[in-house]
Amino acid sequence: MEDFTAFLNITYNNVRPQRGKVLISQPLLSDGCFGRSVVLITEYSKDGTIGLILNKWMEVALEDLLEDFPGKGLQLSLGGPLRANTLLYLHTFDNVPGSIKIFNGIYWGGDLNEVCRLLSLSVMKPENIRFFLGYSGWTAGQLEDELKSNSWLVGDLQPRQIICPTYNLWKESVRSMGDEYMQWTNMPENPAFN
């Protein structure tokens, strides 16, 4: 494994994690939930970290789970392995009461009744909101330990990449980190099959 990690330049890029940054998993991370994942950090403090996986889609639409929910064709994503029965959302509206600003143009949560109202009026559209089941979480010091063990890079995304990501978000995110990480995108998901 060491030969692969040296060849692929798998080392933490020393960017400090914080709200609004993304975690980009290294290509050999074999965890089923976090393998080849991009996670938006929604909360970061000395007590721990919370985030939402941006590139793990579910095969069910929100309307299939919530019969009378206003808004058709809203796809669900797996936000992470914790509380998989909890609905969370990111959106682009700065006027939803109770929402938390992640960074300019991206907000987390807020008054679900207001979100439903905006969706029913077609003021809020699928390109303005994204729903997740569950979330990702790290206890105090856990993420820092994973960074030291070179499991993640810390980077940035634009609001559009977060709300309307492509299915190649992991590769796009890796490419945005610079040429020294380009080999990651060519690495098969299971090196034993190469």
Image (spheres, rainbow, N blue to C red):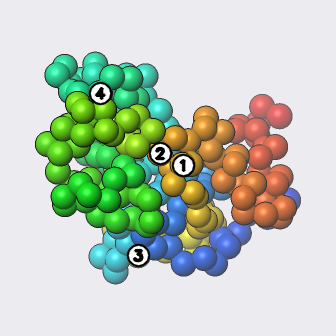
Image side of residue 96 versus residue 138, left or right: left
**Closer to the eye: label 3 or 2:** 2
Residue located 46% across and 73% down the image = 18
Q: Residue at x 41, y 57 (%)?
A: 106
Local secondary structure at mark 4:
loop
User: Spatial distance from mark 2 to mark 1, Cα to Cα?
Assistant: 5 Å
Q: Pick whichever of labels 2 and 4 is earlier in the sequence.
A: 4
Cβ–Cβ under 8 Å for marks 3 and 2? no
Q: Position of residue 8 (x, y in %)?
A: 81, 58
Which mark identifies residue 163?
2
Q: Looking at numbered disc 4 in the image, what kind of residue is underneath it?
A: Gly
Give the residue pinned by disc 4.
71
Label 2, secondary structure: give it. Answer: helix
Question: Which numbered disc, 3 or 1, marks the residue closer to the eye?
Answer: 1
Relative depth, front residue between 135 and 69:
69
Nearest to N terminus: mark 3 or mark 2: 3
Query: Looking at the rendered structure, which numbered label has been put on residue 141?
Result: 3
Q: Residue furthest left?
A: 113
Q: Earlier in the sequence, mark 4 or mark 1?
A: 4
- Measured in 3D between alpha carbons, the distance from the residue under mark 4 to the one under mark 3, in whole angstroms, is 39 Å
In this orientation, which residue lies closer to the viewer: 44 or 64? 64
Closer to the chain start, of discs 4 and 3, is 4
Inter-mark Cα distance, 3 to 1: 30 Å
Residue flagged by tag 3: what amino acid is it? Gly
Q: CA distance from mark 3 to mark 2?
A: 29 Å
**On screen, 32 above or below 174?**
above
In the image, which disc is placed on residue 160? Answer: 1
Q: State yes or no: discs 4 and 3 in contact (Cβ < 8 Å).
A: no
Front-most of 31 and 98? 98
| Amino acid residing under circle 2 | Ile
Q: Position of residue 74 (x, y in %)?
A: 37, 29
